[in-house]
Image (cartoon, helix red, strand yellow):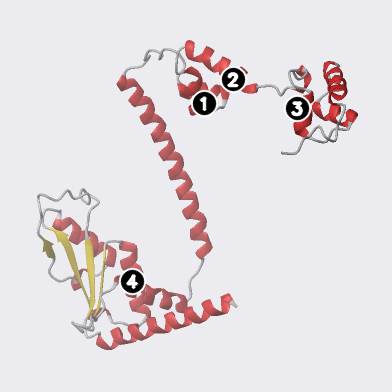
Amino acid sequence: MTDITGKYADFEGLRAQAVALRREGLSRRQIRDRIHVDNNDLLNRLLEGEPAPEWTKRPRAKDDLRARARELRLEGKTYDQIQMELGCSKSSISLWVRDLPKPERRRTHEEASAIARRGWESTLQRRGAERQETQRRATVEIGAMNQRELFLLGVGLYWAEGTKAKPHRRQERVTFINSDPDMIRTFLAWLRLLNVQPAQIRFHVHIHESADVPGAEQYWREVVGRPGLFGKTTLKKHNPTTNRQNTGDGYHDCLVVRVNKSAELYRRIEGWWCGIVGAAEQADQENRT
């Protein structure tokens, strides 16, 4: 190992200078510049045993926070209350006050639950208002829709939600099923754009047998506005072991929209979708270059 005192033969003389400067209140950097010592190891040896002056010590702000946190805990404050007042983390508060007795519960469990429930209800109201405002702005962004836009939307809508022919069962018929009345209305608007005649369209309600079947039938008739074109309702068997959440007055299950003699239309939809996929891939390639 290299002898760091080799360059500084008069070690004791340097130490005497360094100690004297330290006792005058100089910092390590100031001492280093005064005696021209650029080796930190040597400087440590020269100043060994000499405390740093107070002005060079960094203030420990956390000591004050810790003391205040302990005061608040002894006053019976919770971690949340201490955090709100001091702005520090709960993990730090826990370390500082864990040896102190836990404050007595000042509220009953029911009172605490009621306070938490009110806070959660306030949060839900705020989120609901934010959601509605976001939806309002997004609605305005859409604006008017021309016929081509409705045409493309309808093709994508059908290919996402409508029935499609399978290799093992090549049934080519336009059938659309959904529980969202807006989806049904949009699909019907698309069929009208394609000049599909009302006489070709049949509606069938699909619903659990334990639900309000007449109410659901009336609901879907009002949605489509064509009471004379409804076929027989399909009832789904109720499984008592299943905990269904879709119940109550707002439950109307699904409406099936079938287009009779629609094999040719189905093939065109299939072709339109292939065209959309190809055009989308082409546009994507152009966007990348």
Question: Where residue 131 sits: x, y (%)?
Answer: 45, 49
The residue that disc 1 covers is 92
Residue topped by disc 4: 160
Q: CA distance from mark 3 to mark 4?
A: 75 Å
Q: First in sequence: mark 2 or mark 4?
A: 2
Which of discs 2 and 4 lies nearer the camera? The answer is 2
In percent of the image, x 78 and y 18: which residue is there? Answer: 53
Type of residue at label 2?
Answer: Leu
Horizontally, residue 141 falls left or right of residue 265, namely: right
Q: Quadrant of residue 157?
A: bottom left
Report the residue marked by disc 3.
Answer: 44
Which residue is located at x 15 percent, y 54 percent?
Answer: 212
Q: Are marks 2 and 1 in contact (CB under 8 Å)?
A: yes
Secondary structure beneath disc 2? helix
Helix, strand or loop for disc 4: helix
Distance between the alpha carbons at the discs numbered 2 and 1: 10 Å
On screen, residue 65 above or below 207? above
Foreground: disc 3 or disc 2: 3
Where the N terminus falls, by quadrant? top right
User: For the C terminus, which image quadrant?
Assistant: bottom right
Image check: 243 left or right of 67? left
From the viewer's perspective, is the residue at label 4 or at label 1 nearer? 1
Numbered disc 1: secondary structure: helix
Q: Nearer the viewer, mark 3 or mark 4?
A: 3
Give x and y (percent) for residue 21.
86, 20
Give the Cα distance between marks 1 and 3: 34 Å
Q: Which residue is mark 2?
A: 65
Relative to 140, does residue 74 appear above or below in the rendering? Answer: above
Q: Give 60 or 247, whichever is nearer the viewer.
A: 60
- Count every numbered label the image shows and give the total: 4
Residue type at mark 1 is Ser
Between disc 1 and disc 3, whose residue precedes?
3
